Amino acid sequence: MPLEVDDVEILAGTLEPVVIDFDVADRFDADLKMISQRLGNYANGLEEVDPTDGDLLRATDALRRVIEAIYQQRITFKGEERPPSGPLVDGRVDVEEVAGYVAGVRAETIEGGRVTGEVIADRVESGAEAVGVDAKRIGGRRVD
């Protein structure tokens, strides 16, 4: 079920309807519990936020990163120096040797958002192929 974000005026960029990756949510279950314990009093208004508290800032950033992984979208607030909110696909392969085919991201159709793919290889054998992004369509237009 898509989740609606009401306060879109505070975001830089545009979020797509949220589709939760439950496998990722399961993997981060313990982290979410730990972070929610750390931030609970701030979320409930029981403690004042101190913008100079490095531990608080790290916990808040960790929560955002977990939510971004689960929602498969970047969440950026206006005024931040980072890429805008929206769907993202990041793929990275780091190997010693490529003997066949490897891609950071390989997809038939990507409807929108930001896509990055990277392959780092010490050696690519003759006849082998290493590509960052291999997609036939991104955002409704054909990419060859």
Image: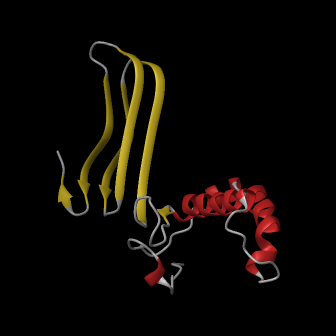
Residue 123 percent location from the top left of the image: 38, 15
In the image, taking residue 102 as reference, residue 94 lies left or right, namely right
Q: Quadrant of the N terminus?
A: bottom right
Q: Residue at x 31, y 20 (%)?
A: 128
Q: Residue at x 35, y 62 (%)?
A: 113
In the image, taking residue 81 as reference, residue 68 lies left or right, namely right
Residue 28 figure quarter: bottom right
| Residue 114 in the image: above or below residue 76 | above
| Residue 1 in the image: above or below residue 101 | below
Residue 25 figure quarter: bottom right
Q: Quadrant of the C terminus?
A: top left
- Nearest the viewer among 103 and 42 is 42
Residue 102 figure quarter: top left
In the image, taking residue 6 as reference, residue 65 lies left or right, namely right
- Nearest the viewer among 123 and 102 is 123
- Nearest the viewer among 79 and 28 is 79
Q: Residue at x 48, y 80 (%)?
A: 10
| Residue 3 in the image: above or below residue 27 | below
Residue 96 percent location from the top left of the image: 47, 18
Residue 132 percent location from the top left of the image: 33, 37
Which residue is situated farthest in the front direction here? Answer: 52
Residue 27 percent location from the top left of the image: 69, 53
- Tell me, what colour scheme is on the image? secondary structure
